[in-house]
């Protein structure tokens, strides 16, 4: 094998700024001259491929298998070798789900990892690609680190790359690239073993043996092999339980975002006659999940609350929870559980990188977001299959349907009616102008009334990390009402086309009456208030959301 280290002259490329979860761009942009190389070099320049004694570091590398994943992996490996890394652990076929990558980083006590994914964004030659760096704790790089990477991309003049042939990433075992070790590993085994330590697999096997039926829609994305191994092979679910189980470079044209709009096949089955007992879907990189009962959809904010209230029923959490954290736009349903359990609760900005410090410090055990993301301290990422297995463990112990468990929950804690409305591909200047006007109006809002509700507070969410004191500002506009209702508005940090406006709507009903309304009907006045206060139609010409979750 020819292995000559080369230094290639380059120049900065504008816009290589990581968003909510890594750098995401259209695939042709990522495949453009020097684009991937510049960003990868910026990663190594910031985190270092060698330690301060000059000893090469060890990294994990994998992706969700989307188009360009395999080519990008070869480039990143050549650059890791040229920059002096000692060893890279790669999932077979350059594939790793995001939670499995997080686990491998921790299990092997490595110096971090690179994950190639644009997560829930569609994949393919004209769709999206992404790259993000995770720290030695297994969690996404915090803002300070991603900002340093971005700064580096603005001043880069050269990158290092080995001139070498491709490494055989399809064969498990040890390979070499220049002086660097490339260990190709089974992407599923270690992750599946970790799940066995957390959940009562014998009880789950008994559940399936007793005729419990499930549908898992992997949406032609990365969780297929993981779900087949765990659900069908280890737990004995009927073969075929997992659908769309083969990961495809373009996700078979599916949009691997596990919500009622994009996982419509699963929704139709779960709402139909002869629906299975339990349904679930996961996203492109396997870190998010939607769970559905027979005839009932579980909103992600409710899912987090139910998991928090029942986690002790699974062996891995039998000792109880240290605390629960949720992102700010997520409903307060989990807070009510934390209060009832007498445990700590935290409210962070959107994005999993904000949970890492709380998890590392042992302040929280469970975390979640309204965007179908839930996870625990077993890794440092949200984890789709983990959430599915925790639900299954709870169902196995409580021997009730999903619908009964949800109704019980609302009777105990009241119901936080909740919905998110997404307005996609708005012209960026229009979205920015709308948000600027909304921000400017905030000081005058408290004391005003709208739709029969009194506004008590309005601000732009800022967060001070309780562990390291770092401050993150402008994390979303909040408008709070006297009756506990709430509107949150922010622009997405993962989109690649124009701006996506996210409007988060919440209204609390204590019960026991009024717990069974349709969320859109229960939230109607809050929805109207949000559109009026933001002057949505005036600025964007829109009033009907593209996606409702
Ligand atoms: C979205 C979600 C956010 C999630 C992020 C990454 O971000 O709202 O809760 O953490 O995606 O998830 P944004 O900035 O577009 O609202 V994933 O599964 O794409 O890694
Ligand atoms: Co994801």
Image: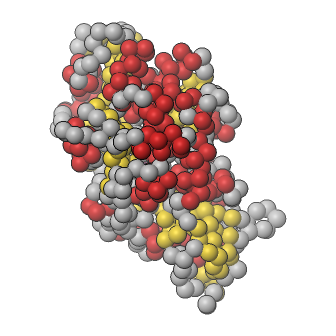
Picture coordinates of residue 181 (x, y %)?
67, 75
**Residue at x-position 55% and y-position 66%:** 186
Q: In the visual, does 169 lie left or right of 371?
A: right
Picture coordinates of residue 130 (x, y %)?
44, 59
Q: In the visual, does 109 lie left or right of 211?
A: right
**Residue at x-position 28% and y-position 28%:** 534
Picture coordinates of residue 314 (x, y %)?
55, 34
Q: How many marks?
A: 0
The reply to whether residue 420 is visible in this rendering is no
Observer-nearest residue: 135 or 237?
A: 237
**Residue at x-position 41% and y-position 44%:** 208
Locate the C terminus and report the quarter of the image it occupies: top left
Going by the picture, which residue comes out furthest to the front?
210
Q: Looking at the rendering, which quadrant does residue 420 occupy?
A: top left
Q: In the visual, does 291 lie left or right of 340?
A: left
Observer-nearest residue: 510 or 40?
A: 510
Locate the N terminus and report the quarter of the image it occupies: bottom right
């Amino acid at each position: 094998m020819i292995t000559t280290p080369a230094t290639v002259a380059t120049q900065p490329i504008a816009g290589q700024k990581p968003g909510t979860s890594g750098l995401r761009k259209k695939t042709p942009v990522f495949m453009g001259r020097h684009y991937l190389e510049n960003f990868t070099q910026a990663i190594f320049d910031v985190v270092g491929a060698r330690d301060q004694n000059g000893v090469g570091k060890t990294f994990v590398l994998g992706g969700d298998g989307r188009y360009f994943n395999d080519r990008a992996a070869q480039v990143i490996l050549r650059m890791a070798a040229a920059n002096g890394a000692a060893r890279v652990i790669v999932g077979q076929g350059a594939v790793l789900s995001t939670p499995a990558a997080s686990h491998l980083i921790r299990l092997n006590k490595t110096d971090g990892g690179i994950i190639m994914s644009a997560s829930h964004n569609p994949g393919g030659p004209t769709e999206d690609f992404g790259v993000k760096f995770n720290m030695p704790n297994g969690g996404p790089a915090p803002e300070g680190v991603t900002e340093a990477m971005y700064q580096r991309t603005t001043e880069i003049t050269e990158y290092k790359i080995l001139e070498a042939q491709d490494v055989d990433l399809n064969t498990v075992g040890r390979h070499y690239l220049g002086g660097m070790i490339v260990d190709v590993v089974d992407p599923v085994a270690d992750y599946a073993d970790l799940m066995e330590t957390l959940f009562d697999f014998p009880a789950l096997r008994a559940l399936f043996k007793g005729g419990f039926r499930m549908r898992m829609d992997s949406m032609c994305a990365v969780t297929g092999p993981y779900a087949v191994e765990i659900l069908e092979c280890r737990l004995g679910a009927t073969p075929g339980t997992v659908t769309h189980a083969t990961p495809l470079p373009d996700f078979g044209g599916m949009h691997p975002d596990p919500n009622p709009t994009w996982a419509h096949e699963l929704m139709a089955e779960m709402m139909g006659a002869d629906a299975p007992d339990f349904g679930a879907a996961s996203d492109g990189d396997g870190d998010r999940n939607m769970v559905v009962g027979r005839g009932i959809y579980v909103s992600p904010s409710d899912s987090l609350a139910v998991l928090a209230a029942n986690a002790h029923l699974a062996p891995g959490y039998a000792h109880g929870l240290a605390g629960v954290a949720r992102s700010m736009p997520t409903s307060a349903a989990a807070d009510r559980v934390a209060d009832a359990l007498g445990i700590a609760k935290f409210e962070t900005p959107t994005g999993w990188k904000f949970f890492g410090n709380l998890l590392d410090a042992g302040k929280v055990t469970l975390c979640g977001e309204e965007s179908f993301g839930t996870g625990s301290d077993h890794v440092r990422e949200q984890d789709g299959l983990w959430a599915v297995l925790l639900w299954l463990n709870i169902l196995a112990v409580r021997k009730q349907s999903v619908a009964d468990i949800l109704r019980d929950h609302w009777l105990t804690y009241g119901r936080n009616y909740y919905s998110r409305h997404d307005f996609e591909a708005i012209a960026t200047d229009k979205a920015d102008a709308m948000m600027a006007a909304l921000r400017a109006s905030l000081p005058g809002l408290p004391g005003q009334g709208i739709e029969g509700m009194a506004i008590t507070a309005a601000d732009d969410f800022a967060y001070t990390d309780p562990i390291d004191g770092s401050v993150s500002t402008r994390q979303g506009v909040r408008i709070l009402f006297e009756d506990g209702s709430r509107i949150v508005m922010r622009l997405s940090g993962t989109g690649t086309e124009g701006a996506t406006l996210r409007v988060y709507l919440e209204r609390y009903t204590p019960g026991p009456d009024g717990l069974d309304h349709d969320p859109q009907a229960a939230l109607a006045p809050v929805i109207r208030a949000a559109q009026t206060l933001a002057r949505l139609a005036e600025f964007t010409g829109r009033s009907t959301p593209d996606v409702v979750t």
